[in-house]
Image (cartoon, helix red, strand yellow):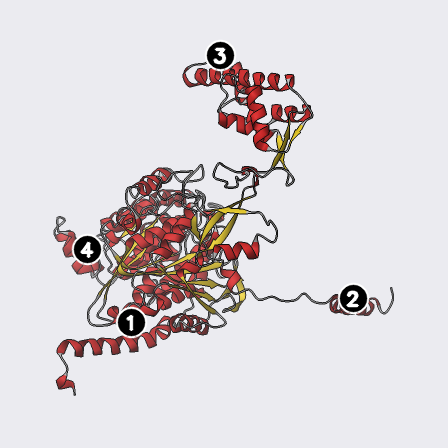
Amino acid sequence: MKGFLKPGLISMITNMEAYRMAKARITEVMMDDTSINVSKEVDLVFSIANSLRGAYKSDKYKDVIIPMIIIRRFECALAKTKQAVVEAFEANRDIPPQILEAKSGYKFYNTSRFTLAELLNDADNIVSNFKSYIEGFSANVQSILRNLDFEKEIDKLDKNNRLLGVVRKFSEIDLNPNTIDGIKAGYMFEEIIRRFSENAEAGDHYTPREVIRLLVSIILAEGCDDLYTERRVATVLDMACGSGGMLSTTQDAITRMNPDAEVRLFGQEINPESYAICLADMLIKNEDAKNIRLQDTMKADCFEGQDMRIVIANPPFGAAWGGKDAADGVESAVKKEHKKAEKYEGAEKLEHSRFPWGLPTSGDMQLLFMQHAIYKMSKDGRAAIITNGSPLFSGNTTSGESQIRRYMLENDLIEAIIALPTDLFYNTSIGIYAFILSKNKRPERRGKVQLINAVDMYKPLRKSLGKKRKEISRDDIRRITEIYSNFEEGEFCKIFDNEEFMYKEYAVYQPLQRRGSISAANIAALKSSAFFTANTRIFNEAEYEVLLETAPREGDDEKKFQNYLKGKEFTEAVIAALEEHASDKEYDDFAEFTKKLKEILGDIEGMTDSRLNQIAMEMSVMDKTAVVQKDKKGNVLTDPTTKDTEIVGLRVDVEEYFKREVYPHVPDAIYVYEYDPNKKASSTNKEKMGAEFPFTRFFYEYKAPEKADDLLAQFNEIERGLEAKIAALTGGGH
């Protein structure tokens, strides 16, 4: 049979079979490291950290410990080839770095004869010798230590008589990559950082490894068949890479399933300590150090022009990109990047800007990271992004958040959203979600979003780790991955068309029916109204008083002051004219009332139809017995003071919605979609179309409250139990 098939078809069948077998192994592969225990190594490191007490505050122990771990790990890695490197260097001090790298077996080396152990042999000169030892490292390692400002810590340790002891203890720790591989080192680093950073913001440094394994399991479960056949290049980006756990875990999973695959890792990180750990790990794994950058992703894309097959990240929650709480230069960089997309439409915006579809509230950059991930994804790219609940529903219809969600849906980029258990992270107990994004959905997923409710899929920890009280077990990862892959509705899975999450916002008004009068009370109300006292176009009393006391007034201040003088004269003239014609007569026809006011006020300098109408509104009240106002064509006019809004799904019949939800309460309600596509978009002409993911609504289960009698019975039982215990303690007395 095989002889009748074309070579290309044979290859395709072979590749499909390889993918099928790989897919079946994904979860098992992700579980291989679940039993790793680093408590011994971590406890040893912390015993060293405790020796710093007195010289350092506890939150500063990391300034010494992290660089020393990095140095010792490099030293252990280089031990076998150290002598050959030193000899080659001493024979020719101009020897090219590439030759030294070849001799060391890594993309780094050390040309100093010193080791941590040998530094102990000359205690009197340990400071200068230690610095010389560090200078013997290749430039990339020196750069890591320089970012950590470690030379300053050497001097401080020596000054406080701690240096010799720290060096001795670290010289005895085995951190050889053959003993402590990348996975184990990742666990070790992250546990150390966790203990040093109990009060860090969620997502600042690390994500629990089982959460990473879940994300990797899901992201590789489909849409990655090409990575498991023959030799393939896979580019992986973490735009907030921390200590590199997500990058390493993704690489490990792909290479275990296809040893011939070439996985290129890219990371950006803003925290110097996390960056140092990540870069050190990448160097030991012989990854390209240029692909790990110390840079704020909000400020710059360090890998412009490089598409990513996989993007995986846990960006910080609730971190400011704008305003007073934002880091220097971030707000201007974000706005400049967003502006690049202004002259383009639709999907084309994404080709020209990292933040094309909108800017979220300045206090939370999560949806900026989401847009950046989409920008970096290749045409068949996939992404897994950890968020809190805010990106699902925050913002009103025309807000940046809503528009970002809308455009992601319109471009069919959201594959699934997974609700994860609370209490998973070390430094937050809030609800966590995973967005699974794809530019290459399988056919049955196109135009749809899968919601997975995994909030109860966990096992409790025997002992809490910070705020982490739960973990996702091996079986939970397998279960969630299967729910995702099966793509079938069930108790924990709902599937919706993209449009189910999109809506239009309709303005709702009541007919213009107002009763007015030129009464003393209404005149007084007008006199104290914001229209007359806090109006920058007419008269703002507070600003006027400030300007009145300002001397000298120059430029814009003087111009504003003169405008307010005119406005003051205008308001005084209006009040004087109204007081002259004060009457208790009531007008139930708003048009007639407005006409009467025009007779009285029409000749006042500065009066316009708009101002006259506003005065009429201020001096009248809505009255359902008053005359319904209509335009010349007989259309009912609306009362702007009654404006409300209704959110209606795109697939919902608007009239049927109002018959069901609005008319029973406001029978004469008038709804309007306030957007004119024929006019230029502006702040007053925005399309009122948005999107949100009301996740909990779709999985809500009503639970009836316990009956009062049952609660009383429980209370009485507890009370009897307490009385019995008291009696037992007191020997039956009271």
Mark 1–mark 3 Cα distance, whole angstroms, equals: 77 Å
Closer to the chain start, of discs 4 and 1, is: 4
**Label 1 crowd (10 A; few <14 / some 14-19 / many >=20):** some
Q: Amino acid at mark 4?
A: Val
Q: Secondary structure at mark 4?
A: helix
Q: How many marks?
A: 4
Q: Position of residue 560 (x, y in %)?
A: 46, 19
Residue located beneath label 3 in the image: 551
Mark 4–mark 1 Cα distance, whole angstroms, equals: 35 Å
Mark 3–mark 2 Cα distance, whole angstroms, equals: 75 Å
Q: Which mark is residue 719?
A: 2
Residue located beneath label 1 in the image: 256
Mark 4–mark 3 Cα distance, whole angstroms, equals: 76 Å
Question: In the image as oriented, which residue stretches furthest toward the right?
Answer: 733
Question: In the image as oriented, which residue stretches furthest toward the bottom?
Answer: 1
In this view, the residue in front, 12 or 242, is 12
- In the image, residue 652 sits, relative to residue 531, either above or below, namely below
Q: Amino acid at mark 1?
A: Arg
Tell whether 516 sits left or right of 570: right
Q: Position of residue 315 (x, y in %)?
A: 40, 53
Mark 2–mark 1 Cα distance, whole angstroms, equals: 60 Å
Closer to the chain start, of discs 1 and 3, is: 1
